[in-house]
Image (cartoon, rainbow, N blue to C red):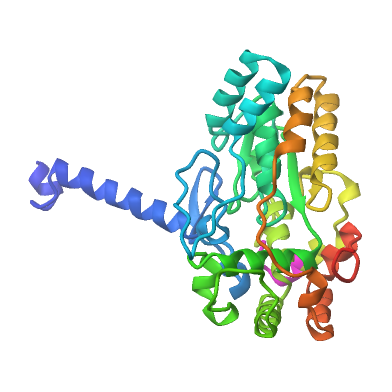
Amino acid sequence: SASARWPSSLTSVGVTRLFVAIALLARGLQAQGFLVKRGGGLAFAEARSVPYSLLTGPIEPFSEIEVGADQPAATEESPPLDEDSPEDLGEEIGEETGDDAQVARVGRKAAQSHRWYNGEKCIVFNHLEKAAGSFVRNVMQLSVVSEWKLEKEMDPVTGDDVSKDNFVIGLTRNPFDWYVSLWSWSAHMRSSYLRRSLPDFFPNHTKGIMGELPEDKQLFRNFVKHMTSGEFGTLSERIYHKYLSVGVQDPGWYITKLAVLAGYHPDAGPTEAAPVSCWVHAETPGGDLRTCLQRYEAKHNVSAVDWPSFEIALAKARQNHREHVPCADFYDEETAEAVRQAESYIISAFGYPSGCNP
């Protein structure tokens, strides 16, 4: 009987509520980075160094507000976002092209979520924080007319992307500039995940030009030394786990990570473990994105991009940015050397200078 199989407190309604509670718990653990998708289900994430684990929390740490999401009102602690919405840009494109249908199409496309698209031989854009990702996403939402998939900041490239022959677009940036952008963005946002997790590395103020005060620069240098104190620098960890370790057994193991990072070169083209088809550099996002989309069209002999809309969106879309002093002003020699050592494989693979971009 039912009473023999289940305790009296576990009625059918009780069992349903229990399963709902477990599902909600799993969703929460996944959002916090404790559970990751693996195969057809979920598994506990591997242990990582402190700097990397901080960056695998919810998407909120970098305050990358999703297009179309409700945006918080500007307060003294929360400066207004300078990001154009695809709907606004779409109206401008429609006005310039005189194509009402274009406005309607862009509006629908901008509102459509690419998060769960699961097609084959499609474009996949995998978003790395503070590397022109919002700019690239906005331009794609306004100009790519074929279906495409968005993998957000916490998402690695998946085995499905390999098996389905998807065209993966990855992001990269000079590590010296990346740390400045990451710190400055978090410093301006009192609610940012990094500021709340590492309060000792950020100033009490959130307004003004970051880095103008001597104490700002020292806080930044302490922050960088902390973020480069693990086995590898945080940017190397991020690029490895997001782009270069698909299907790698025990991807958190030091020797495995060392071998992959030391041996990787972007010109080698996509592989099963590192299936990035095309890289967009934060320093040249527009031209790189154009090249990537052209390569996708040529590879599959398809027309995937509305090129007039692409060029207009490229000219009008803006990048998320917070005011700070020039990159080089943040670094002293000790801090710069810490980045050179911790990010040496990324610097070598992508041909970055051993300091800030000119």
Q: Residue at x 58, y 34 (%)?
A: 114
Above-or-below relation of 302 to 80? above
Classify residue 244 as left or right of residue 156: right
Q: Quadrant of residue 343?
A: bottom right
In this rendering, does residue 145 appear at all? no
Judging depth in this view, the residue of 336 and 191 nearest the camera is 191
Q: Quadrant of residue 265?
A: bottom right
Q: Residue at x 28, y 46 (%)?
A: 20
Q: Residue at x 55, y 70 (%)?
A: 206
> Which segment is the magenta one?
251-257
Judging depth in this view, the residue of 27 and 207 nearest the camera is 207
Percent across and percent down for residue 163 are: 69, 36
* In magenta segment, residue 125: no
Percent across and percent down for residue 289 are: 79, 39
Classify residue 279 as left or right of residue 204: right
* In magenta segment, residue 256: yes
Judging depth in this view, the residue of 2 and 219 nearest the camera is 219
Percent across and percent down for residue 161 are: 68, 38
Q: Residue at x 10, y 48 (%)?
A: 4
Q: Quadrant of the N terminus?
A: top left
Percent across and percent down for residue 309 are: 73, 25
